[in-house]
């Protein structure tokens, strides 16, 4: 399977099953369209009006060499009879420190932080039990992770301060290393919190949607006021201290800011270098949800952003844009490429009450309740359903050129739009494929092939 695309006059060919990426000339590009269906003699005849015999023969030799090396028209060695490993372990928890929030983000999948239920804060007892559960369920794995999430987790900073040293000590006793991350809207990111993150080498995900008018429209306070000015001040203060565990500025763009590339550039101008801006996922009945008619403009925006990122790199001001990060030298391990994030069996979410769910986006849907951190997992059927939600069980993925980059997409989005873990969110797929083309082109530029 090949995927061919052009970007600013550069001809790119992706050999899907080997992962090889080729930059080719117009002649090879045209030959590849017919290479598998015609004999060399027929190809020479078809191309002879535009190219010399020597050019065509040389191109055919180059193509054949790549085929022989397993870098073109490679067959899929995994499709027949693939079965995911059943001896996996829990690697990470999304630990909900608070089911409450001090903002009222309009697109919030968690219902302004409460996940369809009452507000609540994680207790130290449940938090310790969650850490014990992770240490126990991680088997021989050395590196494990916890993301403090919400709602807004800093509403429960007191408990977070208790749990981090407890987790580090438990991990040390077990011969493991526990990495903590905090996802925050920034309203409570004061100097005490910033210093705590720095001292404990915690990573941070900082929520910012872009330009002031964009951010304030979608992320207001309970009284309807904007939050941009306050959170940008806190984020800049924090990032200027060069946090050793890193950070991401994480934004969401909607139908109200289809020109989202300008928001990425706005964040860059504020001094942020690690940026993730993602398309909103929402029902079509909301005014901020994307429609099919928006796709051409959104594709243009990704192309525009690609050029802007390259210009900044050339100017010595590179941006690490999360959604353009792909590894063409080998990439993630095979299970990761085929199954994605591991939600439901390697990655779990924990509510303030200690309930376990496949991921944060399933929290509150009791059909997906897996168990509790104190009693363990009791619903193995759901675990197995998520384990089997890999690309070879998704008919729409099998023939998709981007399947090894997106790994079948987000399970929660598939369920939300199709009520089926095995049917990906169609609009999201189209945007993802465009992002991967842009990411591949940027890497080609970086190694000097375009």
Image: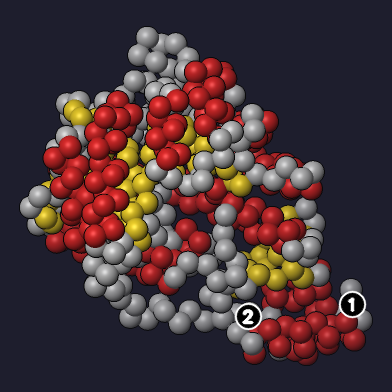
> In whole angstroms, how far apart are the C-alphas of marks 1 and 2?
25 Å
**Residue at (39, 60) in percent of width and height:** 340
Residue 8 at what x, y percent from top left? 78, 53
Q: Can you say whether 344 is above or below 19 in the image? A: above
Looking at the image, tell me whether mark 1 or mark 2 is earlier in sequence order.
1
**Residue at (88, 82) in percent of width and height:** 55
**Residue at (19, 61) in percent of width and height:** 136
Q: Can you say whether 324 is above or below 149 in the image? A: below
In the picture of the structure, the residue carrying the numbered disc 1 is 51
Q: Which mark is residue 184?
A: none
Residue 2 at what x, y percent from top left? 60, 71
Quadrant position of residue 391? bottom left
Tell me if 444 is positioned left or right of 287 in this view. right
Quadrant position of residue 233? top right
Label 2 Cα crowd, 10 Å radius (few <14 / some 14-19 / many 20+): many
- In this orientation, which residue lies closer to the viewer: 319 or 286? 319
Q: Can you say whether 411 is above or below 117 in the image? A: below
Residue 406 at what x, y percent from top left? 47, 58
Q: Contact (CB < 8 A) between labels 1 and 2?
A: no
Q: Secondary structure at mark 2?
A: loop
Quadrant position of residue 286? top left
Residue 288 at what x, y percent from top left? 46, 27
For the C terminus, the image quarter is bottom right
Residue 290 visible, this angle: no
For the N terminus, the image quarter is bottom right
Tell me if 10 is positioned left or right of 142 in this view. right
Q: Nearer the viewer, mark 1 or mark 2?
A: 2
- In this orientation, which residue lies closer to the viewer: 349 or 316? 316
In the picture of the structure, the residue carrying the numbered disc 2 is 71
């Amino acid at each position: 399977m090949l995927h061919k695309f052009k970007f600013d006059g550069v001809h790119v060919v992706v050999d899907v099953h080997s992962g090889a990426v080729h930059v080719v000339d117009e002649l090879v590009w045209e030959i590849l369209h017919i290479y598998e269906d015609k004999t060399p003699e027929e190809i020479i005849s078809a191309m002879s009006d535009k190219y010399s015999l020597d050019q065509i023969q040389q191109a055919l030799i180059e193509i054949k060499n790549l085929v022989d090396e397993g870098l073109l028209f490679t067959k899929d060695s995994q499709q027949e009879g693939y079965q995911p490993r059943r001896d996996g372990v829990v690697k990470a928890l999304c630990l909900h420190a608070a089911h409450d929030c001090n903002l009222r983000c309009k697109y919030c999948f968690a219902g302004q932080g409460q996940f369809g239920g009452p507000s609540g804060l994680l207790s130290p007892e449940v938090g310790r039990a969650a850490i014990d559960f992770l240490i126990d369920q991680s088997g021989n794995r050395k590196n494990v992770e916890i993301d403090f999430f919400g709602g807004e987790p800093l509403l429960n900073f007191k408990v977070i301060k208790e749990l981090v040293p407890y987790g580090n000590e438990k991990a040390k006793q077990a011969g493991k290393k526990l990495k903590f991350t905090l996802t925050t809207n920034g309203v409570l990111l004061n100097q005490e919190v910033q210093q705590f993150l720095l001292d404990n080498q915690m990573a941070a995900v900082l929520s910012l949607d872009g330009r002031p008018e964009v951010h304030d429209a979608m992320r207001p306070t309970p009284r309807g006021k904007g939050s941009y000015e306050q959170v940008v001040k806190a984020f800049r203060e924090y990032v200027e201290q060069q946090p050793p565990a890193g950070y991401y500025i994480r934004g969401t763009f909607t139908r109200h800011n289809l020109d989202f590339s300008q928001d990425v550039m706005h964040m860059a101008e504020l001094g942020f270098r690690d940026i993730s801006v993602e398309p909103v996922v929402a029902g079509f009945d909301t005014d901020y949800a994307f429609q099919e008619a928006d796709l051409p403009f959104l594709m243009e925006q990704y192309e525009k952003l690609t050029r802007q990122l390259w210009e900044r790199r050339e100017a010595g001001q590179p941006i690490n844009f999360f959604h353009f990060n792909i590894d063409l030298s080998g990439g993630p391990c095979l299970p990761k490429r085929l199954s994605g994030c591991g939600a439901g069996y390697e990655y779990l979410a924990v509510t303030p009450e200690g309930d376990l769910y496949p991921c944060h986006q399933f929290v509150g849907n009791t059909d997906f309740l897996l168990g509790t951190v104190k009693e363990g997992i009791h619903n193995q059927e759901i675990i197995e359903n998520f384990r089997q939600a890999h690309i070879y069980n998704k008919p729409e993925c099998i023939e998709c050129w981007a399947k090894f980059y997106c790994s079948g997409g987000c399970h929660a989005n598939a369920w939300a739009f199709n009520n089926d873990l095995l049917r990906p969110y169609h609009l999201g797929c189209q945007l993802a494929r465009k992002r991967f083309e842009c990411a591949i082109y940027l890497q080609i530029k970086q190694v000097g092939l375009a």
